[in-house]
Amino acid sequence: MKKILKFSLVLAAVALTAVEAHAGNTDFSLDLKKEEGKTVSFTLREIKKVDLSIYDTSDNLIYQENVTSDDDINRTYDLTAFPDGVYYLQAESDLKISKYKIEVVGKVAKLSADAISEVYKPVLVNKNGIVTLNILNLNQVPVTVKIYSSNDTEVYNETLPAELNIGKIFDLSNMKGDKCTFMITSNGKTFVETVEAK
């Protein structure tokens, strides 16, 4: 039998404030510097650490790197070896995942300056087994939250409505075991985080 955890709704203003405070430290923007032939150059501003990946339209990983910098992150990619087609540059920080479109046609590669999608990661704050979940849900899609006990038993499963700001509080202090795992699915992405239950 599933155990239902006690929870209460956190006001949207509180959720937005927590996410915005977190965003001030890890949000970023992409500035397209130049496109020359099959070479694209860009700068990621307001970020010191990011994971960059390039995928094809079948979601196959073509290239990946983890970048750390004391200043803005500058990158130049030579796509000469890429056949004509559409590719996606994904930039992932602690807070969000942004996807940019790359088109390779003939001897030219073009990178979109604006993200074609952005997904903000959920923010979990744990204070002695009381866990606050905040999600900035820009795409306003339903979000599924599952919680598993330390022995991998599902103890909570709910699909939350498609609201801009989602906030919930979970009382994990009475759970058996010392840890539990949150599995949060939104906009086709699943985020997994383990927290202390006590």
Image: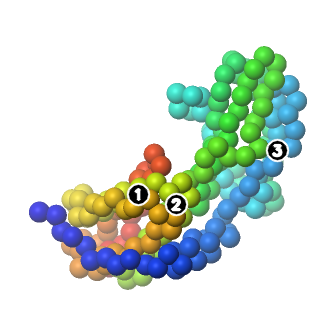
Mark 1 vs mark 2, CA separation in Å: 9 Å
Q: Secondary structure at mark 3?
A: strand
Mark 1 vs mark 3, CA separation in Å: 32 Å
Task: Give the tally of numbered discs.
Answer: 3
Q: How is the image coloured?
A: rainbow
In the rendered view, does 130 fall on the left or right side of 176?
A: right
Task: Give the residue drawn at x 16%, y 64%.
Answer: 2
Classed neighbour count for the residue bearing mark 1: other residues with Cα under 10 Å, few (<14), some (14–19), many (≥20) = many
Ranked by sequence position, the earlier of labels 1 and 3 is 3
Q: Position of residue 137 (x, y in %)?
A: 52, 60
Ranked by sequence position, the earlier of labels 3 and 2 is 3
In this view, 104 is above or below 30: above
**Numbered mark located on residue 143 in the image:** 1
The outermost residue toward the bottom is 128
Classed neighbour count for the residue bearing mark 2: other residues with Cα under 10 Å, few (<14), some (14–19), many (≥20) = many
Q: Position of residue 49 (x, y in %)?
A: 68, 57
Ranked by sequence position, the earlier of labels 1 and 2 is 2
For the residues bearing labels 1 and 2, Cβ distance under 8 angstroms:
yes
Tell me which amino acid carries mark 1.
Val
Image quadrant where one finds the N terminus: bottom left
Image quadrant where one finds the C terminus: bottom left
Q: Secondary structure at mark 2?
A: loop
Tell me which amino acid carries mark 3.
Leu
Task: Give the residue drawn at x 52%, y 80%.
Answer: 14
In this view, 126 is above or below 135: below
Tell me which amino acid carries mark 2.
Asn
**Numbered mark located on residue 137 in the image:** 2
Query: Mark 3 — residue?
Result: 32
Q: Is residue 135 visible?
A: no
